[in-house]
Image (cartoon, rainbow, N blue to C red):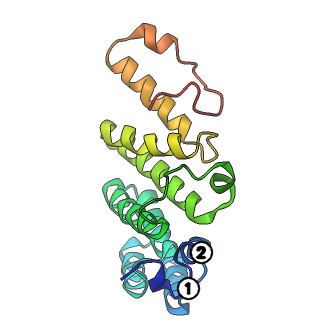
């Protein structure tokens, strides 16, 4: 089943963009997410509610965002990464096999909800991979935003800068580290994913 079409819209890309903004979620799933939010201090009760919401709307970005946040803020980074990978696969499917050839352009990176969801998911996965020590995976995740969002509208360049500094210091390359500013300007110019 086509993920975006499964959300009940005629235009798959537009459907995904609408769902990334929270549209198209059933009232039952929405209520489950809201109840889970009220129980965030009792994760053993909140998680089953989020799991039920996901069973009702397995491909809806709002459910994935809620699950990601639950795991992320609960410091369950491996679980957050698994949800992020699911979200990335759903976004790629919704955007279509030719997405990115050519890159979508600055307006899409600034205003298209589906493109921004995809880019922010890549950024989130890059961050999680950095935290989990999966540096090659982080670098891979940062390559796509650099190509698709050269103006760095979602802020992935900062993570590329963190990765470059970490690797320079880890390898004892003081000269490379000295070439990196402590606080980079926005954008990819100083970043090397």
Rate crowding at label 2 as few (under 14), some (14 to 19) or many (20 or more) other CA atoms within 10 Å: some
* Residue at (31, 37) in percent of width and height: 136
Q: Is residue 80 left or right of residue 15?
A: left
Nearest to the observer: residue 93 or residue 158:
93
Image quadrant occupied by the C terminus: top left
Instruction: Give the quadrant of the N terminus.
Output: bottom left
Position in image of residue 155 (x %, y %): 59, 43
- Say which residue label 1 marks: 10
Instruction: Tell me the residue that label 2 is attached to.
Output: 14
| Residue at point 44%, 26% (across, down) | 164
| Label 1: which secondary element | loop
Say which residue appears at 61% left-offset and 76% top-offset: 18
* In the image, residue 60 above or below residue 65: below
Mark 1–mark 2 contact, CB under 8 Å?
yes
Measured as percent of width and height from the top left, residue 44 is found at: 35, 75
104 sits left or right of 89 in the view: right
């Amino acid at each position: 089943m086509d993920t975006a079409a499964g959300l009940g819209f005629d235009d798959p890309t537009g459907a995904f963009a609408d769902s990334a903004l929270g549209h198209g979620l059933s009232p039952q799933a929405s209520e489950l997410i809201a109840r889970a939010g009220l129980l965030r201090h009792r994760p053993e009760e909140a998680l089953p509610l989020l799991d039920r919401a996901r069973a009702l709307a397995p491909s809806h970005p709002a459910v994935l965002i809620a699950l990601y946040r639950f795991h992320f803020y609960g410091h369950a980074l491996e679980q957050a990464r698994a949800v992020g990978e699911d979200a990335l696969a759903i976004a790629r499917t919704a955007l279509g096999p030719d997405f990115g050839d050519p890159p979508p352009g600055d307006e899409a990176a600034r205003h298209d909800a589906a493109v921004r969801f995809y880019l922010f998911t890549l950024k989130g996965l890059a961050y999680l991979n950095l935290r989990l020590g999966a540096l090659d995976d982080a670098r891979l995740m940062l390559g796509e935003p650099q190509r698709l969002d050269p103006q760095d509208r979602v802020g992935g360049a900062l993570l590329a800068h963190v990765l470059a500094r970490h690797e320079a210091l880890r390898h004892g390359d003081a000269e490379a580290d000295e070439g990196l500013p402590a606080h980079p300007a926005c954008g990819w110019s100083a970043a090397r994913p």
